[in-house]
Amino acid sequence: MSSLLHTLAPVLYVKDIHKSLDFYCDILGFERPYIWGDPPGFAMPKREHIIIMLSQTNDSLKIQPKKDIWDVYVWVSDVKFLYEEFKNKGANFTQELILKEHYGNLEFIVEDPDCYTIAFAEGISKNSFF
């Protein structure tokens, strides 16, 4: 049987859709998408099979990045390559590339303009999920 699930698209509330798109597209390499709404305030940048839905809001209470864990976790096939790519583009890292031995992933974490954290990881041991 072929795969039934294809991708996941979390929704993040943001203060400034254009500033957020600059980060996701210029720093993280997502495709620059169409912006919906009047005024424009919703977009879905995509990179390969990953989509992040961004919804601009004037209600600061809706913008709630997690403080004790990442907001989005992305498994990748070459985490070292992505780390160098993002580093060369000026990404703000909240965690440099390290091995998380207790769950077997090599990972790093970047922070977007609204303080959401996105972890990128590659499973490298028998403890990893993938």
Image (tube, helix red, strand yellow):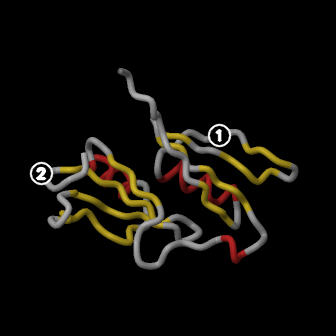
Question: Foreground: 11 or 56?
Answer: 11
Q: Which amino acid is tagged 2?
A: Lys
Residue farthest to the left, as pictured: 126
Please tell me how crowded label 1 is: few (under 14), some (14-19), or many (20+) other residues with Cα within 10 Å.
Answer: few
Q: Position of residue 84 (x, y in %)?
A: 30, 53
Q: Quadrant of the C terminus?
A: top left
Q: Which residue is mark 2?
A: 126
Q: Residue at x 41, y 64 (%)?
A: 110
Residue 27 location in percent, x, y? 48, 53
Q: Please state which amino acid type lies under the numbered disc 1.
A: Pro
Q: Earlier in the sequence, mark 1 or mark 2?
A: 1
Up-down relation of residue 11 to residue 45 (above or below): below
x, y (%) of residue 24?
Answer: 54, 52
Instruction: Point out the residue furthest to the right here.
Output: 38
User: In which quarter of the view is residue 11 placed?
Assistant: bottom right
* Farthest-out residue, front: 1
Q: Does the CB distance between marks 1 and 2 fall below 8 Å? A: no
For the N terminus, which image quadrant? top left
95 or 50, which lies in front? 50
The residue that appears at 27% across and 50% down in the rendered structure is: 79
Which of the 4 quarters of the picture holds residue 3?
top left
Of helix, strand and loop, which one carries label 1?
loop
Label drawn at residue 65: none
- From the top left corner, tell me how far across and down residue 101 is, in percent: 15, 65
Distance in Å between CA atoms under marks 1 and 2: 37 Å
Report the front residue among 61 and 41: 61
**What residue do we see at 70% from left, 67% from top?**
15
Residue 72 position (above or below residue 67): above
Secondary structure of the residue carrying numbered label 2? loop
For disc 1, the marked residue is: 33
